[in-house]
Image (tube, rainbow, N blue to C red):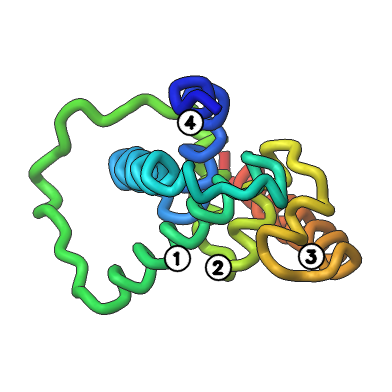
Amino acid sequence: MVFEHIYQNHWQKVFRLCMGYVNDVDLAKDLAQETFVIVLNKLPEFRSESKIGTWIFRIASNNCLRQIERQKRYRKVQLPKHVTEENEPEIESEIAFLYKCISELKEVDRIIISLELENIHQEEIANIVGLSNSNVRVRIHRIKEKLQAKFKNYERKI
């Protein structure tokens, strides 16, 4: 397998998965980049026991979980309110709100819904997160209900 081809086919999906975890564009880009560094280094060890995408998503989700653990250990410091960030990317308000809602979910639910949004088959999602197919199906249904309720409240506020 050619790494460049793998990178081109999976970078956007991995980035969106990372966004679902951290809800921070720069950090998600860093995590996606770290994921592909790992993929590049481990590619000779890939045994083709699963699809390459499933393997990459597993690496990405583990990478994101490690980042969340690191964040828990260190206190966050915010810029003063009168200082604005430069070059903040433009994200549609609905998409930004979706990422915010996803980032508030439990860690396993974040990866499940992020993979579901990438149109990954539920069977593959079950393999990635280590749950049964039926458990994943139920969780997806419940997560979607939570997100729909949050969007209804969001629309009322607009």
The residue labelled by disc 3 is 139
Question: Residue 12's spot in the image, x, y percent?
Answer: 51, 29
Secondary element under disc 3, as helix, strand or loop, is helix
- The Cα atoms of the two marked residues, 3 and 1, are separated by 19 Å
Q: Earlier in the sequence, mark 3 or mark 2?
A: 2
Task: Estimate the spatial distance between the alpha carbons at disc 1 and disc 2, rounded to whole Å.
Answer: 8 Å
The amino acid type, in three-letter code, at marker 4 is Trp
Q: Counting residues from the N terminus, which is met first, the one under dot 1 or under dot 2?
A: 1
In front of the other: 149 or 29: 29
Q: CA distance from mark 4 to mark 2?
A: 21 Å
Task: Check if mark 3's residue and mark 1's residue have beta carbons within 8 Å.
Answer: no
Closer to us: mark 3 or mark 1?
1
Q: Residue under circle 4?
A: 11
Identify residue type, mark 1.
Leu
Q: Position of residue 35 (x, y in %)?
A: 41, 46
Which quadrant holds the C terminus? top right
Q: Which residue is mark 2?
A: 107
Instruction: Classify mark 4: residues with Cα within 10 Å, few (<14), some (14-19) or many (20+).
Output: some
Label 1 Cα neighbours within 10 Å, binned few <14 / some 14-19 / many ≥20: some
